[in-house]
Amino acid sequence: MLLFSCSDDNDEPSLDASLSLTNGPVVTVNPSGVAPLTAEIIFSTNINVSVKIRVVGKNDEAADVIHTFPSANDFELPVLGLYANYDNQVELTFLGVQEQDLGTLLFTIRMLPLVDHMPEIEINTINAEEIKSGFNFVNCFGHNDDFNPQRPFMFDQFGDIRWYLDYSDHPLLSELFYDNGMGRLENGNLFFGDGSTNAIYEITMLGEIVNSWRLQGFGFHHHDIEKPNGNFLVT
């Protein structure tokens, strides 16, 4: 379920007079069907703007997810870092060519609970000075129900799971066995080998397959690595 509201008390868009939305916004939860804690916001504007997105953290600013998308007037914005079973507050701030603030819209996106058998994470001690920016990526090897598909996930410094993939109903990856797990390519996408289909896959953070490479009669086991020239080493 999702709600879309505006960022002032009068339910009117708090946008500069020079800026208007010519299409949308359309908000879709889990647009790929395999990344339950993601969404996508599609819209167009009458002028070129850059857009800063902020997923407001439950705890403090350290849990915020912030990203700025480059100047354009047609946008398909992935929304990452949402909380399960929660009314997520998502802010879109529009910036002009001189980085001037052209206004903000607020979205409330209600996400479903986590699927069964996801781990509960307890943080015993937080040492903020020793924490690197970003989330903790876990290549979870299995879960308590059916072993496959394996489900990678990310959690923040407060122990909240903010992203995961679930290919249970996917036509290719419903038996995903990635062995040592997923890595990240230089272009920001994820990649992994699958022992069930004996292929290598490149996916977006929404879980969408953008490339795949068959192993031509060989099986996949253990690991794959991206070389500096963009080729892969695969066992």
Image: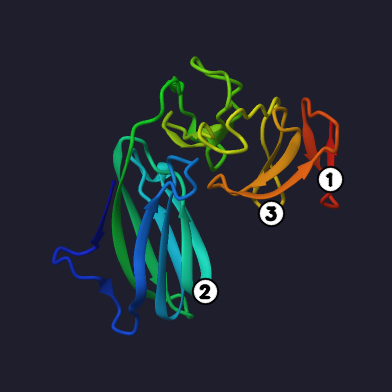
Q: Residue at x 41, y 31 (%)?
A: 160
| Residue named by callout 3 | 187
x and y percentages locating residue 232 in the rendered image: 83, 43
Left or right of 2 in this view: 147: right
Residue lying at the far left of the rendered structure? 10
10 Å crowding of disc 1: few (<14), some (14-19), many (20+): few
In terms of sequence position, does the residue under pointer 3 or pointer 2 come before the other?
2
x and y percentages locating residue 131 in the rendered image: 54, 35
How far apart, in angstroms, are the residues tagged by discs 2 and 1? Answer: 31 Å
Q: Secondary structure at mark 2?
A: strand
| Residue named by callout 2 | 71
Amino acid type, callout 1: Lys
How far apart, in angstroms, are the residues tagged by discs 1 and 3? Answer: 13 Å
Residue lying at the far bottom of the rendered structure? 18
Report if the CB atoms under discs 1 and 3 are less than 8 Å apart.
no
x and y percentages locating residue 134 in the rendered image: 53, 42
Left or right of 115 in this view: 207: right
Give whichever of 219, 24 is nearer the camera: 219
Q: Residue at x 32, y 66 (%)?
A: 104
x and y percentages locating residue 120 in the rendered image: 42, 21
Amino acid type, callout 3: Asn
* Number of the label disc, if any, that sits on residue 182: none
Q: Secondary structure at mark 1?
A: loop
10 Å crowding of disc 2: few (<14), some (14-19), many (20+): some
| Residue named by callout 1 | 227
